[in-house]
Amino acid sequence: MTRARSLVLEALERSAEPLSAAAVFSGIGEACDQATVYRALSYLEAKGRAESFVLHCDEHGTERYYSAGSAGHRHWFHCVACHRFVDLGACRLGGLVAELERERGVRVTGHALYLSGLCTDCAASQPVALETADRV
């Protein structure tokens, strides 16, 4: 593996939450340019060493986030107030996916899931609860 790919993978493995390409680039300093970071992320994802999802955040816009793929497929919670991510653990949708495949005759080859809302700290400091009508 090239030095740049190793640095990018190490940055993902050190982080407790998903990182944007810009955050990876900032975290590895002057070791390589931004285009190299994007190429390394693409390579690592293609090899199963990283995974990504696209998140839309009112404050930060739409951005792709990456995490190390060595821990298996994971789902995330995104706090809309502080922009923190909380690891929801390994994917538990296997039964649902199998049921959908059986019922609908489709073959699922992948999925991405993240939940949004307020983390414990932000929820405690919010004077008004989020509207439940916005829940999906």
Image: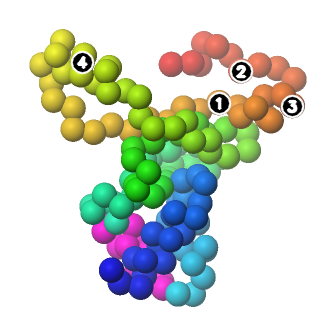
Q: Relative to 36, say whether 51 is above or below.
A: above
Quadrant of image for the N terminus = bottom left
Q: CA distance from mark 3 to mark 1?
A: 13 Å
| Label located before the other in sequence (3 or 1) | 1
Q: How many residues crowd around disc 3 within 10 Å: few (fewer than 14), some, or many (20 or more)?
A: few
Q: CA distance from mark 4 to mark 2?
A: 31 Å
Q: Which residue is mark 4?
A: 100
Question: In the rendered structure, which amino acid carries the disc numbered 4?
Answer: Leu
Q: Nearer the viewer, mark 3 or mark 2?
A: 3
- Judged from the image, the secondary structure of the residue bearing numbered disc 3 is helix
| Label located before the other in sequence (4 or 1) | 4
Q: Look at the image and say whether residue 38 sits in the magenta stretch.
A: yes
Q: How many residues crowd around disc 2 within 10 Å: few (fewer than 14), some, or many (20 or more)?
A: few
Q: Which residue is mark 3?
A: 125
Q: Position of residue 133 (x, y in %)?
A: 60, 13
Residue at the image point whose x is 52% and y is 87% from the top = 31
Question: In the rendered structure, which amino acid carries the disc numbered 1?
Answer: Gly
- Judged from the image, the secondary structure of the residue bearing numbered disc 4 is helix
Q: Nearer the viewer, mark 2 or mark 1?
A: 1
Q: CA distance from mark 2 to mark 1?
A: 8 Å
Q: Look at the image and say whether residue 92 sits in the magenta stretch.
A: no
| Label located before the other in sequence (4 or 2) | 4
Q: CA distance from mark 3 to mark 2?
A: 12 Å
Q: CA distance from mark 4 to mark 3?
A: 39 Å
Q: Which residue is mark 2?
A: 130
Q: Residue 117's mark? A: 1
Asked if disc 3 and disc 1 are in contact, CB closer than 8 Å, the reply is no
Residue at the image point whose x is 45% and y is 38% from the top = 90
Residue at the image point whose x is 54% and y is 53% from the top = 18
